[in-house]
Image: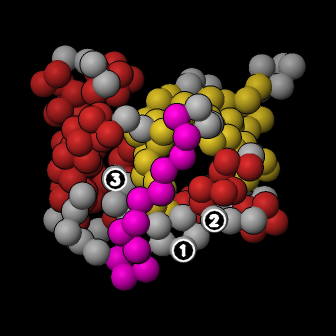
Amino acid sequence: MSTHRDPSLTGVERTFGEDEIIVSKTDLNGKMTYANEVFLRISGYREDEVLGAPHSMLRHPEMPRIVFKRLWDQIAAGREIFAYVVNRCKNGDHYWVFAHITPTFDAAGRVTGYHSNRRRADADVLARVKGIYDRLLAAERAQDSKKSAMDASEELLDRLLAEAGMSYDEFVFTLAA
């Protein structure tokens, strides 16, 4: 990915089994309410360190902010989303996932939290994803404020989607095709 380097990162990629699923749940504010054993093992955190903590503690600096904005916009509106995500482990290692995030609803149909299932991302797909994310990150880093960075990244992503003639969800699934 990008050459912009955070000194707390090790550059070591962790992987997990093809048949394993990382699962976590959050409240409406993104604070974790559940993490399965695979999540804890791969991330390097203990359960008492993650429960009640913001899921954003896993945010890797090489992850474009616009992807998270799209993610939050979708799930806050009560819709599921799929995304490729790189997360930071407690020790600075990282791991890539193909995430499926869904809202959790109560009996009255109100969103009460969020549920994320993550599978290991396919290495061939990641080559394409990393190229796109590098472009989005470059657009963000060329700006002098968080707002202008988000605007520039969103403009680029929207242009890529328009050129491809598809929605974000369709785009994500065509990466694996």
Tag 2: amino acid: Gly
N-terminal-most mark, 2 or 3? 2
Tag 1: amino acid: Asn
Residue visible at 43% across and 48% down in the picture = 96
Tell me whether circle 1 and circle 2 mark residues in contact (CB < 8 Å): yes
**How many other residues sit within 10 Å of disc 3, few (<14), some (14-19) or many (≥20)?**
many
**How many other residues sit within 10 Å of disc 2, few (<14), some (14-19) or many (≥20)?**
some
> What is the chief secondary structure element of the magenta stretch?
loop
Disc number for residue 64: 3
Disc 3, SS: loop
When the figure is inspected, residue 95 is found, relative to residue 103, above or below; the finding is below
Residue 15 forms part of the magenta stretch: yes
- The CA distance from mark 2 to mark 3 is 23 Å
Disc number for residue 91: 1
Q: Percent x, y for residue 60?
A: 43, 62
Residue visible at 37% across and 35% down in the picture = 122
When the figure is inspected, residue 19 is found, relative to residue 152, above or below; the finding is above
Residue stretch rendered in magenta on the structure: 6-18
Q: Quadrant of residue 159?
A: top left
